Image (cartoon, rainbow, N blue to C red):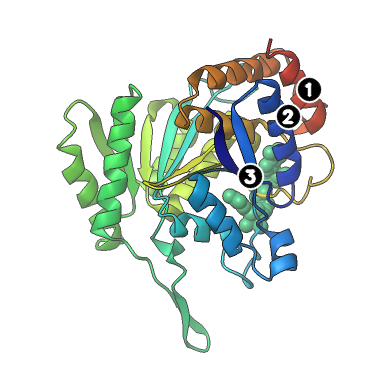
Amino acid sequence: MTRAVTLIRGDGIGPEVSDAVLEILAAADVPIAWEEAVVGQAAEKREGDPLPASALDAIRRTRVALKGPVGTPIGKGFQSVNVRLRQAFTLYANLRPVRNVEGVASRFQGVDLVIVRENTESLYSGLEHTVVPGVVESLKIITEVASTRIARYAFEYARANGRRRVTAIHKANIMKLSDGLFLDCFRRVAEDYPDIAADDRIVDAACMRLVMNPESFDVLLLENLYGDIVSDLAAGLVGGLGLVPGANLGNDAAIFEAVHGTAPDIAGQNKANPTALLMSAILMLRHLDLPAHADRVEQALFRTLREGVKTPDLGGATGTREFAKEVVARLA
Ligand code: NAI
């Protein structure tokens, strides 16, 4: 059965890495009918909104999207399209597996961790205001409902995927109420999963341990901001942002996207690594219950990297388009 999936190419390197991924998935005969939705700069120009209602309707219909990165103006301008999408569909769980890939040099070996990031609240609620000129307030919202939901997701994920430990990462020594509530919810939920070890670490100490002994972590549970920061840190452990996929999951929809942004420094130069978006697409194929297609694409990708075919971010000289062709050649 062919499945309809919304495609958002996005800004910056988004169209380049999307085209590479589409070429590979087409060559692997994935039974997907793509429905493109325009989001980001092009949508803002055309419709005055970077996230037009037509795109939201498209995702509401297909319930699954593959998405390239979308830029957000810094310190001014419109609210992040990415945050709006996650809130619009209550995509409460942001899942980001980070592991070493054979053939990719890294200072660390044995990294195999999974970041589970709460995706709907904390400081990303966008509640900021000027109290008096020169004083602004940014509200960190933490709720029992969202904290319990994400903790339960982390333990369910661990159980379903043969993981042994969930570590909650927080700053409850300073933010006793907000991070304290997040931690309390985690501890309560942990009691329902005696088969999975549960512990917690303060975020600063966790960061040090991540860059000294990353192999000691399994599943990491974090609120929104810490999850955002630690995701990029963790990407750096295994070779960079070109390699780390992501899924935004809710009860009614799922959006698959890489951790990286629009990479304006290399956009339009055929230099971007499509691996992260391809790995996100592989997560999507498993979500769509297409495990044979997922395995086939994944094996071709890993073989390509193992055989030394690399984009410039990994020290190679292969372009985005040429990399896609190398993966296609290994699909057989
Ligand atoms: P970025 O992730 O776009 O780039 C950081 C560095 O990593 C750059 O040097 C870039 O060249 C490199 N890089 C990223 N992806 C790569 C890839 N696939 N292949 C090779 N190199 C890669 O982060 P930055 O510059 O902070 O953000 C740029 C824009 O992206 C901002 O407007 C930001 O808001 C947006 N953004 C969007 C996200 C999304 O749509 N989910 C996520 C993160 C940022």
Of 115 and 274, the residue lying toward us: 274
**Which of pointers 2 and 1 lies earlier in the amino acid sequence?**
2
The circle on residue 325 is: 1
> What residue is rendered at 33% in x and 32% in y?
157
Residue that mark 3 sits on: 35
Instruction: Say what amino acid the circle numbered 1 marks.
Output: Lys
**Cα distance, mark 3 to mark 1?**
23 Å
Q: Which quadrant would residue 19 be assigned to in this image? A: top right
Residues marked 3 and 2 touching at CB (< 8 Å): no
Image quadrant where one finds the C terminus: top right
The relative height of residue 235 versus residue 132 in the rendered view (above or below) is above
Instruction: Mark 3 vs mark 1: give the one in front.
Output: 3
Residue that mark 2 sits on: 23
Of 330 and 313, the residue lying toward us: 330
The relative height of residue 312 versus residue 258 in the rendered view (above or below) is above
Of 195 and 54, the residue lying toward us: 54
Mark 2 surroundings within 10 Å by alpha-carbon count, few (fewer than 14), some (14 through 19), many (20 or more):
some
